[in-house]
Amino acid sequence: MYVDAILDNRLGDAVWARYHIDGGVQNGIIDGSNQTVLESIEEYAIGYRVNSPEQYFEALPFYEKTSTKDGHPDVTELILNAASTTATADDTEL
């Protein structure tokens, strides 16, 4: 699923699959945390936007071009919406 998603430019599906690839998600919660996959993706996106803004903004056009056949557009939406977040480095752990 992961490789197919990348090859098909379904980037939300690829990110989603990456979280599930090792079996570390049970009932929607990431093992060893109380976070859902979407909460974790949002936290990481904001963390990158705050702590590595040059790389984050360089990656945005890549995510904006995800396929319309993507089964997880909510994932790319979270990544893209981190651009407008007002978090500071003190708010992130990355």
Image (cartoon, grey):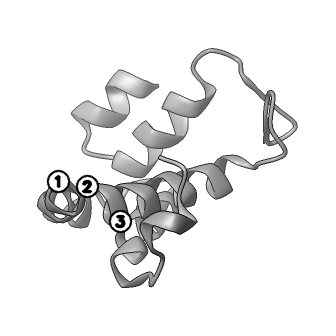
Three-letter code, disc 3: Val
Q: What residue did someone put label 3 on?
A: 50
User: What label does residue 52 carry, if any?
Assistant: 2
From the viewer's perspective, tell me whether residue 43 is left or right of residue 12: right
Disc 1 is placed on an element classified as: helix
Tag in front: 1 or 3: 3
Mark 1 vs mark 3: which is more N-terminal?
3
Badge 2: few (under 14), some or many (20 or more) residues near its Cα, within 10 Å?
few
Considering every residue shown, the one lying at the far top of the view is 22
User: What label does residue 55 carry, if any?
Assistant: 1
Q: From what the image shows, is residue 15 above or below residue 57? A: above
Q: Where is residue 30 in the image (x, y as percent from the top left)?
A: 75, 35
Residue at x 41% of width, y 76% of height: 81
Q: From what the image shows, is residue 44 above or below residue 91? A: above
From the viewer's perspective, tell me whether residue 26 is left or right of residue 9: right
Q: In which quarter of the image is residue 19?
A: top right
Residue at x 14% of width, y 64% of height: 61
- How far apart are the alpha carbons under marks 3 and 2? 6 Å
Q: Position of residue 69 (x, y in %)?
A: 37, 56
Q: Position of residue 86 (x, y in %)?
A: 45, 84
User: What label does residue 39 carry, if any?
Assistant: none
Tag in front: 1 or 2: 2
Three-letter code, disc 1: Gln
Q: Position of residue 51 (x, y in %)?
A: 33, 57
Badge 1: few (under 14), some or many (20 or more) residues near its Cα, within 10 Å?
few
Three-letter code, disc 2: Ser
Q: CB under 8 Å between callouts 1 and 2? A: yes
- How far apart are the alpha carbons under marks 1 and 2? 6 Å
